[in-house]
């Protein structure tokens, strides 16, 4: 399930956080929100009550389509490199989530299938991949309106290709199943 949802995140780019897309492939007890690749963004999502919420904050992914990757150790290092020198912030309804640096999680190895014309310019195919990053996993929020605000800033002086800033807010409407069309 992680891989399927991770692929869903990876195809979303800047200015692509729409309420309609927020509901794509949302099955099971966890609602997956996308990370943001740069700039500022806001999105309103309606989520059924009782769903936990998962959102990637700062994530690096690498796979064997990269010419620099020759071993699984290279793969791990490549996935982690983009997260170094990152500063992350998250809050829910104005309350800061503390100790985010402790939320770093490696994915383990998985197969990633890329399509022709993907936004990263990778060749089409299925590749062994690895992801490493910081994720927020929230218990189900009570019905009503909630804001989840996330910020990432990476200023890597060694590997500057990883540098970016992102600031995004999810305006969440937690709806009882009887008040929703889904």
Image (spheres, rainbow, N blue to C red):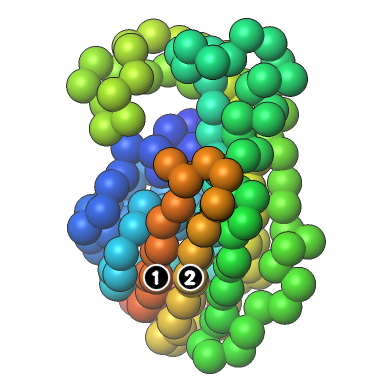
User: Is residue 75 toward the left or the right of residue 160 in the image?
Assistant: right
Instruction: Mark 2 or mark 1: name the one nearer the start of the chain.
Output: 2
Q: On the image, which quarter does residue 85 sit in?
A: bottom right
Question: In the rendered structure, are the residues bearing label 2 and label 1 in contact, judged by CB atoms less than 8 Å apart?
Answer: yes
Q: Looking at the picture, does residue 64 appear above or below residue 23?
A: above
Residue 140 x, y percent position in the rendering:
60, 70
Q: Quadrant of the C terminus?
A: bottom left
Residue extending furthest toward the front? 157
Q: At 25% from the left edge and 63% from the top edge, which residue is drawn?
A: 19
> Would you place residue 162 above or below residue 167 in this image?
above
Q: Quadrant of residue 61?
A: top right
Quarter assignment of residue 78? top right
* Depicted 162 relative to depicted 47: above or below: above
* Residue 116 higher or lower than 1, as above or below: above
Does the rendering let one see residue 123?
yes
> Looking at the image, which is closer to me, 177 or 102?
102
**Residue sitting at x 62%, y 39%:** 81
Mark seen at residue 167 = 1
Count up the numbered dots.
Answer: 2
Q: Residue furthest bottom?
A: 94
Give the side of residue 87 with respect to residue 42, left or right. right
**At numbered mark 2, what does the secondary structure look like: helix, strand or loop?**
strand
Residue 112, position in %: x, y? 49, 20
Say which residue appears at 70% left-offset and 67% top-offset: 100
Residue ID for mark 2: 151
Q: Percent x, y for residue 63? A: 53, 20
């Amino acid at each position: 399930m992680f891989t399927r949802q991770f692929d869903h995140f990876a195809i979303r780019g800047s200015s692509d956080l729409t309420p309609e897309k927020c509901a794509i492939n949302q099955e099971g007890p966890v609602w997956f929100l996308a990370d943001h690749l740069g700039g500022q963004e806001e999105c309103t999502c309606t989520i059924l009550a009782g769903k936990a919420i998962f959102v990637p904050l700062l994530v690096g992914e690498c796979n064997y389509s990269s010419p620099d990757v020759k071993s699984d150790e290279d793969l791990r290092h490549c996935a982690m490199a983009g997260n170094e020198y990152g500063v992350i912030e998250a809050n829910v309804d104005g309350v800061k989530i503390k100790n985010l640096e402790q939320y770093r999680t490696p994915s383990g190895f998985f197969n990633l299938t890329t399509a022709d014309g993907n936004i990263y310019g990778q060749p089409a195919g299925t590749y062994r991949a690895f992801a490493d990053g910081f994720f927020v996993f929230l218990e189900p929020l009570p019905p009503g309106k909630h804001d989840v605000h996330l910020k990432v800033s990476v200023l890597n002086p060694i590997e500057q290709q990883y540098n970016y800033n992102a600031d995004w807010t999810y305006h969440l409407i937690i709806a009882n199943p009887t008040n929703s069309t889904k």
